[in-house]
Amino acid sequence: MIDEREIDDKRRFEFGSNWTNFLSVLNQQRIDDAESSLKDMLGIERLDGLRFLDIGSGSGLFSLAARRLGARVHSFDFDSQSVACTRELKRRYFPDDVEWKIEQASVLDRAYLEGLGQYDIVYSWGVLHHTGAMWLALENAIGRVNTARGKLFIALYNDQGWKSHVWWLVKRVYNQLPRILRSLFVKAVMLLTYFAVFAKYTIRLKPMTAINAFRTPERERGMTSKYDRIDWVGGFPYEFVSFDTLTSYLKARGFRIINSKRNTSLGCSEWAAERTQCAE
């Protein structure tokens, strides 16, 4: 169950509220982009008959994409509003569908995870680092990957040393603020960030690099820059890991990396890995 005290005490970002707003701008192009993201990273065109576990379903966009690609989907999220968003997408596109199940649960609940069995694809993009126990969450996710060449697709924040610790503080402050001030805080933080990036590259006589850094793709993975910014500034709890550390960890746990995207800044790196053996 949700620990509402974490939200009341301003220790956890209300991700579901942000996703509720995102649904108002969801369209077919964003859904197509989400499908393309899954196909590109997993190296497969269709998911027909495959069992797909969406850990931290958020808006439900990628559960929807997986279902449209033919997978049998199980979605769950810690946040009640996120669960409501996912159920709304199912209502819109797959009403009364028995091949898409949605529940409210925590990835930290080992008993719940073990009760789900194993899946051909376990997906969790930008979720595990917001649990407050990232490594436990990762282990629980790994445990759900089918031992017969199942796949894991995850994204986690990149470790940038002191910069990551500064952002931890920024996120903490956001969640301490009264709601009325949060929007202004997001704008102020992003303005300062853009100024810092522009100044850095201008000093290096690379002004176009600075300008390009501001051009975040509006439809990357089917998402929007507006709601991603709110998630980025407010997303708390917040943990991070280096690309090499997580790559080595997955290999030690019996996985082969089939695709990856290394982020060299503060965003998320991505890994798509296939289980080749069970770790001892």
Image: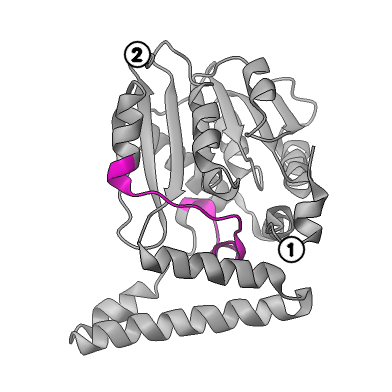
Under mark 2, the amino acid is Gln
> Residue 159: x and y, percent?
37, 56
Give me the C-alpha separation between circle 2 and circle 1.
Answer: 41 Å
User: Is residue 79 shown above or below 113?
Assistant: below
Residue 2 appears at what percent x and percent y?
78, 42
Q: Is residue 259 visible?
A: no
Which residue is labeled 1 in the image? 10
- Using the image, determine if residue 247 lies above or below residue 111: below
The residue closer to the viewer here, 172 or 63, is 172
The residue located at (47%, 84%) in the rendering is 192
**Residue at (51, 21) in percent of width and height:** 143
The residue that label 2 is drawn on is 277
User: Mark 2 or 1 closer to N-term?
Assistant: 1
Front of the two marks 2 and 1: 1
| Image quarter hosting the C terminus | top left
Is residue 141 magenta-colored? Answer: no
The three-letter amino acid code for the residue at tag 1 is Lys
Instruction: Judge by depth and name the residue closer to the eye, 42 or 179.
Output: 179
Stretch in magenta: 221-245
